[in-house]
Image (cartoon, rainbow, N blue to C red):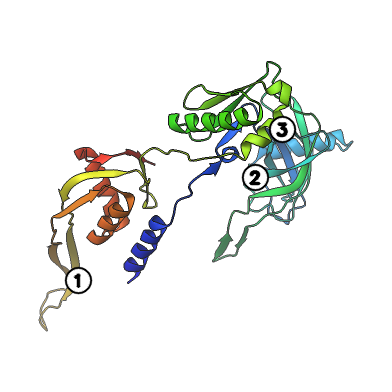
Amino acid sequence: MMRRLLAAALLCLVCAPAIASVRIKDITFARGVRDYQLIGYGVVVGLQGTGDTLRNSPFTEQSVSSMLDRLGVNVRNSALRTRNLAAVMVTAALPPFAGWGSTIDVTVSAMGDATSLMGGTLILTSLSGIDGNVYAIAQGPIAVSGFAVAGQSETLTHGVATAGRVPNGATIERELPRPSADDGSLILELRNPDFETAVRIADAINRYSQQKYRHAIARERDNRSIALTGVQRRGATRLLAEIGELRVEPSSPARVVIDERTGTVVIGQDVQISPIALTHGGLTVRITETPEVSQPAPFSNGRTTVTSQTRITATEETGQVATLQGPTLRTLVRGLNQIGLKPTGIISILQAIKTAGALQADLVIQ
């Protein structure tokens, strides 16, 4: 019953009407407009005995000693025993055009043997980019979604308690260099490169520019980018806002993605299978060990022993030869559901069909 419901749901998903077009701004982005990754090393304090063991994490002890030394407290020759602090790595993504004084979220992850960061506070930490410059400083209480509780005989864990976030915990101290269009050109990058999609985007932009500016401004460069000219006279921001609302119908390659770890199979809309005949079955061998007690006769010198009786059975499922052909995604899914296979069986069949040369699509195995 569950298999029938799953097959019906999959068929309904396939039969649902596809979106005819999408906005250009949803499938492209301007070159140079990207997030900038930041990283820093810091210390979290205020933990309830769930922090690092200083003897097992010497870098934590060195960090605390250096921090207290800068604050005028000398603990160089002291043996610290506290477990209320932990060494962490702090990461953040600096969005484009973020101005001085604005705030962003940061992610805090434990480095040592701390069991939980719940209730902790991140001490002032500088965040640097790949060029070594400090772009932001972070500080604040940590929000942890998971927890870990341990007793003498049982441990309860939910989520990840050694990682959390500090909402609006970092303040921008240095702005990123802004991408410029001094030469009057702008490049649009496709999120999913495709030659046909690039041509359709360029044609849609040119139809709009011909109507409004009386000349074409877009030219496809390759399957990944479209060049826009004459941006400086109109302004890049206004032009991107205008053409971003234009709608095109993207083209996607025929592709089958398989994740063998989770048993997930994703089949693209344009995937086709040439007419083939296949059969699928399995051989199951079961070995059963049954212990039996051998009891000697009364008044004999024998000893009681335990013997084992082994039973081996082999069963093989009957396999029927079925004809499979998928000129469209709907018929392909219906054919796979009629065979009545589990995800692992579908994965094996798709790999065998690709080897036979009947799968007219790219097979991606993750």
Crowding near pointer 2: few (<14 within 10 Å), some, many (20+)? many
Residue 304 seen by the camera: no
Residue of label 1: 291
Residue type (three-letter) at the residue carrying disc 2? Ala
Whether 141 is drawn above or below 91: the answer is below
Residue under the image location 20 percent in, 51 percent down: 324
Circles 2 and 3: CB atoms closer than 8 Å: no
**x, y percentage for residue 366?**
39, 42
Residue of label 2: 110
Residue type (three-letter) at the residue carrying disc 3? Arg
If you read the primary sequence from the N terminus, does the residue marked by circle 1 or circle 3 appear first?
Answer: 3
Nearer the observer: mark 1 or 3; the answer is 3
- What secondary structure is marked by label 3? helix
Residue of label 3: 238
- Identify the image quadrant of the N terminus: bottom left
**x, y percentage for residue 176?**
74, 27
Whether 237 is drawn above or below 334: the answer is above
- What secondary structure is marked by label 1? strand
Residue under the image location 48 percent in, 23 percent down: 222
**x, y percentage for residue 49?**
71, 55
Crowding near pointer 1: few (<14 within 10 Å), some, many (20+)? few
Q: CA distance from mark 2 to mark 1?
A: 51 Å
Residue 226 seen by the camera: yes
Q: Compare residues 175 and 51 and report the one nearer the observer.
A: 175
- What secondary structure is marked by label 2? strand
Whether 258 is drawn above or below 12: the answer is above
If you read the primary sequence from the N terminus, does the residue marked by circle 2 or circle 3 appear first?
Answer: 2
Nearer the observer: mark 2 or 3; the answer is 3
Q: CA distance from mark 2 to mark 3?
A: 44 Å
